[in-house]
Structure formats: C-alpha cells, structure tokens
Image (spheres, helix red, strand yellow):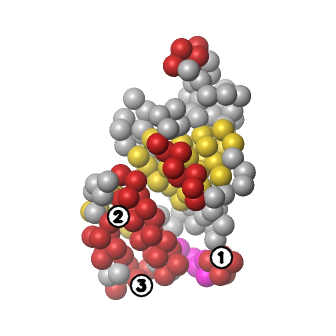
Amino acid sequence: MLFMESWPAPKIDTPQEGALGCPAPHVVACAHAAVVMELQRPDIDMVVWGRRVPAVWETHLKDWSGSPSSLILSGKPSEIAKSLAAPTVLQDWPPVILTDVRDLSSLFGALTGGVRQHIRLMASPSSDAIFEFPPDILRLICAYGRTGAEWCSNQDPKNGIVRALSPFAVAFIRGFS
C-alpha cells in the first residue's frame, strides 16, 4: 500500500504553520479504497483513490469515440441510478462508464449523507470544465482513461507544480472556506 501527502508539507501543518507556509492543498493518495476514509480528517483538502480497474474497461473504452453531448443529472443516488438506465443515456454512453457512475454516486451518497448530487459526465474536458470550489462542497472527479483532471499545488499557477489525475483514478475535493 502506498500512502503519501502532497508537497509542500513534510508533515501536517498546524493552523499557525498553514497561514505562514505555502498555500497548497493537502492531498492524500493511495491505491487502496480505504483512502476515502481520510476525508474525515479536517486537514485534508483532497483525497485521490488511484484505483486499479479491470483491463476490460480500457478495452471497452479504446474504440469509443465519445458521446455527442454532456450528461447532466441531479438527484439522490437512487434517482441518479434510475436516470442512468434511461434508453437515451444507454445509447450514448458505454455500460462500463454508466455502471461506474452509478457506483460512485452510491459511494458519494454514503460519504455525504445522501444529499442531492449534481453530476456532469463529459466525453472530453472543455473550457467549462474548470470550476471553483465553494465552501462546504465535496466534489468527485474521475477521468475515464483519457486526459486526466489537473490541479496546481499552489494557488498561483505560475508558482505551483501541476499534477494530473491518473486515468480511472477518483479524486474527492473539498471546497475551501
């Protein structure tokens, strides 16, 4: 099991040190699903579950050219699951992705107490995929074998290190207060 905390802190910052140090997010990453439990720590801004997926996922997605439009859903996990089973959705998206979105929605629901979710599924990232993190919001991001999401290790992108999410990895990101 690999467990790491992101640069710049060699240890967890105290509130006093955090205000004086580099304003970078604290990230915990691991290949084991138990890493999601790190979201309980108040000092963690982002958790990356670098999951390993079956090779068949990559095979199914290799020749997929992408959906013609984004899929946007809102609701509780049971409502999301029902929407994902609609014939028009099944026509545009590979079953492996839809099954995973349903499963991640259930996991996300368990982590957030079943509150309403807003899901946006895109075939490829676009300029409108960039978003701010309002306080008290938890975000989940997953890139399905294509270009991964990127984040900067500093609030000033010119001074930070740009990191990328591995294909199929899942990132849980907290909004900053």
**What number is the disc on residue 91?**
3
Q: Which residue is drawn at the image coordinates 43% and 49% (left, top)?
A: 139
- Kindly report the distance in space between the C-alpha atoms of the residues bearing marks 2 and 3: 15 Å
Q: Is residue 141 left or right of residue 114?
A: right
**Measured from the top left, where is residue 100 in percent x and y?**
49, 71
Amino acid type shown at disc 3: Gln
Say whether marks 1 and 2 touch (CB < 8 Å): no
Name the quadrant of the C terminus. top left
Local SS, label 3: helix
In terms of depth relative to the viewer, which is nearer, 105 or 65?
Answer: 105
Magenta span contains residue 62: yes
Residue beneath disc 2 = 72
Tell me where the magenta segment starts and ends, as one range: 60-66
Real-space CA distance between mark 1 and mark 2, rounded to the nearest whole angstrom: 26 Å
Kindly identify the amino acid type of the residue bearing the numbered disc 2. Answer: Ile
Q: Secondary structure at mark 1?
A: loop
